[in-house]
Image (cartoon, helix red, strand yellow):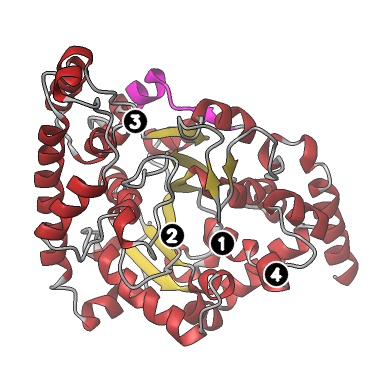
Amino acid sequence: MAENSQQNAADCASRLEEMSVNEEATGNGPIPGEDVVTPWNVESATDDGVDYDKLIKRFGSSKIDEELISRFEKITGKKAHHFLRRGIVFSHRDMHTILNLYEQGKPFYLYTGRGPSSDCMHLGHLVPFMFCKWLQEVFDVPLVIQLTDDEKAIWKNLKIEDAIKLSYANAKDIIACGFRKDKTFIFSDLEHIGTNPAFYQNMIRIQKCVTFNQVKGIFGFGDSDPIAKIGFPPTQAAPALSSTFPFIFKNKKVPCLIPCAIDQDPYFRMTRDVAPKLNHPKPALIHSTFFPALQGSKTKMSASDNNTAIFLTDTPKQIKNKVNKHAFSGGRATVEEHRELGGNCDIDVSYQWLRFFLEDDEKLENIRKGYSSGEILTGELKKELIEILQKIVAQHQEARSKITDEILKEYMVPRDLSFV
């Protein structure tokens, strides 16, 4: 048995040494003149923001095209989410495989996560959960949500106890999105892994398959980084293996679909390379673009800078003041010039945010034409956004106020999710 284990580990290591030429596991280090996109840092190389077409080529994923969207609608019988229609969810790995499974009536599950770095989430944090909730409704499948409080304890140097508290606070915001309790399991890494042997065992299996050189190449770790960072990626990879949750999947090898922002892709390129060696299917992925800060694509949205984002605890007055004062404008210097030349929707944050939160395609197109022609002024565009954001945040606050500690516990207790 020991010899077999050593051979398996050697096979995995040998396989991963080929990652430099493997589509699934290309390196993630900085490239001069290119956008920096890692799980911890996103910096655009130009004032135009991240070049997503270049990123698709660099990461080796596939663009979501009209053919895939049409197939999605045909198989599910549902109109594609406006994130898909507008290219906000823009890239994928093996989404056709997931559609094949759904078409054949075969099972799969959803896996997504949140790194709780503050006790208050903002609208940018809400976006992926809005899409994930829609996917759960369309496919009617189990969902596991990982709260990587261990990651934040490492990167943000938080106390373990404080990181767990942030997980609880963020979990209430996530539950308020409306996820089905009978189909959703939310867990804190710092609390759950120690009680679930299968989770830790899969972490070890993954760790044995990834060499030190490869984890440095994929994630850009340096020699002075703490070993906690180097050891973390298998923790995020493990939930993509269904055997990590025997109380849900009864140890069946079930495929997984991971909705995430494109910066999280390095974790799952690694996972997709390792999974077949561990007798599991490769997880499929569907990637979203980044949500811009109020000050524009060159500015980082930060939980520590209250003026870069709209937080889910903001009042209607705070929302109005933030948008009016801080939302980067694509308008002209004067009203006369704006009427003559029109505004630039590509850089105007109010319009970009409307692409995320205004579901009516016809109304959005009319706004685009009106602003681009100069018929709609910047103040009018901001007013439209303010009204929509105030409604979304108010609805969320009402829903969250009803999430008691008992309800939170019901979502976070390991249990059977009626998986068949």
Name the amino acid type tagged 2. Gly
Q: CA distance from mark 1 to mark 3?
A: 34 Å
Badge number at residue 347: 3
Q: CA distance from mark 4 to mark 3?
A: 45 Å
Q: Quadrant of residue 380?
A: top left
Q: Which comes before the other along the chain, label 4 or label 3?
A: 4
**Residue in front for this viewpoint, 118 or 98:** 118
Q: Between label 4 and label 1, give the one nearer the viewer.
A: 1
Q: How far apart are labels 3 and 2 at the CA level?
A: 29 Å
Q: In the image, what residue occupies the spot 46% across and 34% down? A: 49
Q: Name the residue that disc number 2 marks.
A: 113
The span from disc 4 to disc 1 (Cα, nearest Å) is 12 Å
Residue type marked 1: Gln
The answer to whether residue 281 is seen in the rendering is no
Stretch in magenta = 61-72
Q: Amino acid at mark 4?
A: Ile
**Residue bearing mark 4:** 204
Q: Nearer the viewer, residue 255 or 355?
A: 355
Q: Which mark is residue 236?
A: 1
